[in-house]
Image: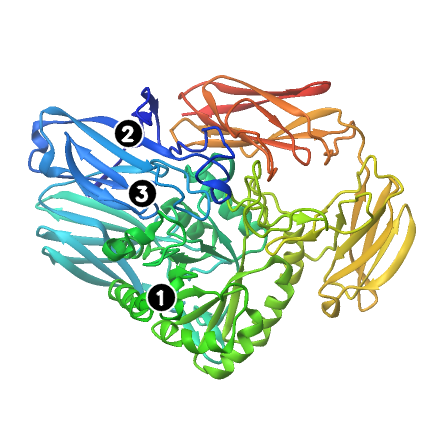
Amino acid sequence: MKRQNFDLNWHFSLNDGEEILVNLPHDFSIGQPRSPDSKMKDSGGYFQGGNGKYRKILYLPEDMKDSVIQLEIEGAYMNTQVYVNGNMAMFHPYGYTSFIVDMTPWLEFGKDNTIEIHVRNDALPNSRWYSGSGLYRHVWLLTGKDLYFRPWGIFVTTPVVSRENSVVKVEADIIGCGLLNLTLLDMNGNSVATGESSVKSGKNSIELNVAESVLWCPENPYLYTLVSELISGDKVADRIETKIGIRSIELDREKGLLLNGEPIKLKGGCVHHDCGILGAASWDLAEERKVKAHKDAGFNAIRCAHNPPSPAFLDACDRLGILVMDEAFDCWRMGKKPYDYHLYFEYYWKRDLSSMVLRDRNHPSVIIWSTGNEIPERLGASNGYEISAMLASAIRELDNTRPIINALNGFWLEWTEEMTEKSAPFVEPLDIMGLNYHWRAYDDVLEKYPDRFIIGTETLPKEAFENQQMAEKHPRVLGDFVWTSLDYIGEAGIGHAYLPEEDSRTHGLPYPWRLANCGDLDILCRPRPQSFYRQILWGHRTKPYIAVHRPNNRGIKAEPNYWGWWDVHHSWSWPGSEGCKIFIDVYSHGDEVELFQNGISLGRKKAGATEKNIASFETRYVPGELKVIAYKDGRPVGEDTLQTCGIPHAIRLETDKTSMGSAWGNIAYVTASIIDAKGNVVPYACNEVTFELSGPGNLLAVGNSNPCTEDSFIGVHMKAYEGVVMAVINTTSKTGNISLTASAYRLKPATLTIEIVD
């Protein structure tokens, strides 16, 4: 079907209030005031829900009278009702799956048609994390007439994969009769294979032979473009372009997970759907930025927790080379929150599971389907064994080319022999057993079940070394996914650090906590110390890394919560702590490290695998310089240095683009750093920064990565956290320049310009 973007100019009202004009993607929760009385509580970061109504007029000319006209809604949270000219066209309760609405029966031609989409997020709590609210992903208008492809009707597989010659099989689900033409283009736009066949309504298959194939993999994410055309007479009735990758997946008892015949370990992270300071609004460039940050940090895999992601996210994984575990549900019949998906699972599971598989099965990045996470039925309750088999069977009917997994955990934080036995019927229909936080059980499980494969579907940051060791020890341990690789809104404070007298709860920290505070990357996508530790374990980073524990007048280390990391910082600037005891960790792949304070050695210590790649020191804080040298086999192999910075002096602005297109959806990220007179970022600076924008643009969001603050992501003012504030800008016109100025009391301001190009 012809596909037209339908994001612009929706009339929106919140809780039946005054209408405003909005464009999609739109999250109506992120701009509302947070409150300790929020029904979302800590799970939702103390944000608010509500009821949103979106209204739009669609004029259809008379000559479209015989057309089929549908909407594709990529994501709406949640309990979505679609009305066409006052007629209820569809109800879709799940907040994360895309869905197709056939509007044809209620449309009038030669007239204006009123489309209303009601999105209700007032039955709270309904999520264990920040969900956002509203039409937070794209909406598309689909039209077809006489001869067209069904939505999600192209299915591409690669039954034969080799660099010499591969076979690309194309199954096309078609309405009408005509001629199907296929052309496969390489990345330079050259045709490398063609096919043609007469087709009729239903599923039709053609195989293409591709000589000298370039195989898709994380190191070389090579994408072909499949052009599928339906010909009626001498006219092209419908046309679809599909990005595909030629690659194979296989599970081998002796070698583990094979990609294109080669063993690969998953170096993964779990990611929720929010886009940081933009909330749940799924901007394509924001999704790509998340993926790129993972790639830069050494990850090769992401688990979508705990729901299907946006198409833009998967597109970015295809382009950048990140493997994906695509997950369907966080609960089945037995719920985790009073108003979550368990209320609807019985009646909607098949539609939602089909949506995930049909929509996402052409993405080469997607290598594993997951039927759920920490399902309460995992030990057989509420027909759990039967449901596990039912879901796995439903996936295989739609796609039998990928393995299937489910992520299991204990009750709560232990795994016993009894659980291994009771979970066996649940795991039996699956290809891989997912285990959350239970690397200690791997040896026993693998011995008891010699055909079983395991993935650490959630692992703790502070157990990265142990999980890495398990993956290296066992071929059937395919890798792990840390909880989490990217910090997120909600589950407030589960990764916080605490002193003995402070709150050590694992869940439920009070307002104004808003972030989980447990990601390798913060919500601005900046790597935190635990990320550099993991990079060293993976061999992605060869330099050592100095991590300084935040000093306190007790002279002790803060302890990390269950999902947390130690309260360490890549900083030697601690004003007011002169003379205090201070602890320093050095992460290194070297055998030994030597730490120097102001040129004086604090000793040489082991730091290799026997020490979990960490050497620890203590000293008294004195401003100046810290320097570490790493040694391997007695030879220096890298160094890291920290210098005490000066006082805040000015603001420095940096942007990820100096020019951007004028089309809706183009955004730029601008980082405002508080710097000293020498240009060093002042990590303790918390100055309030004010942004002033002129020209054809908007400030979509301003924010910092502070996990516990009352600051809003909407506005023009924002306090720096760790010396940094971020702003996100989008365009509103086709011409001109955007000028952004950042200022703060007693600091030298900064201005940058972004050119808008048509």
**589 up-or-down from 448: above or below:** above
Q: Position of residue 228 (x, y in %)?
A: 23, 51
Which amino acid type corresponds to the residue marked 1 in the rendered image?
Arg
Q: Is there CB contact under 8 Å for labels 2 and 1?
A: no
Instruction: Give the CA separation, mark 3 to mark 2.
Output: 15 Å
Q: On the rendered structure, is 101 left or right of 741?
A: left
Please identify the quarter of the rendering in which residue 335 is found. Answer: bottom left
**Which secondary structure lies at badge 3?**
loop
Q: Which amino acid type corresponds to the residue marked 3 in the rendered image?
A: Glu
**Label ID, residue 600:** none
Q: Secondary structure at mark 1?
A: loop
3 or 2: mark nearer the eye? 2
Say which amino acid is labelled 2. Answer: Tyr
Q: Is residue 524 left or right of residue 168?
A: right
Residue 402 - label: 1
Residue 74 - label: 3
Please tell me which residue lies in front, 485 or 708: 708
Q: Dot 3, crowdedness within 10 Å: few (<14), some or many (≥20)?
A: many
Q: Is residue 664 above or below residue 586?
A: above
For the N terminus, the image quarter is top left
x and y percentages locating residue 316 in the rendered image: 43, 47
Q: Residues within 10 Å of mark 2 (few under 14, many from 20)?
A: many
In the rendered image of this protein, does residue 517 appear above or below residue 59? below
Front residue of 352 and 232: 352
Alpha-carbon span between mark 1 and mark 3: 23 Å
Q: Which of the colour schemes (rainbow, by chain, secondary structure, one colour) is used?
A: rainbow
Look at mark 2 in the image and give the residue it sits on. Answer: 54
Q: Where is residue 2 shown, x and y percent of the image?
A: 21, 40
- Note whether 314 is above or below 695 in the view shown: below
Q: Earlier in the sequence, mark 1 or mark 3?
A: 3
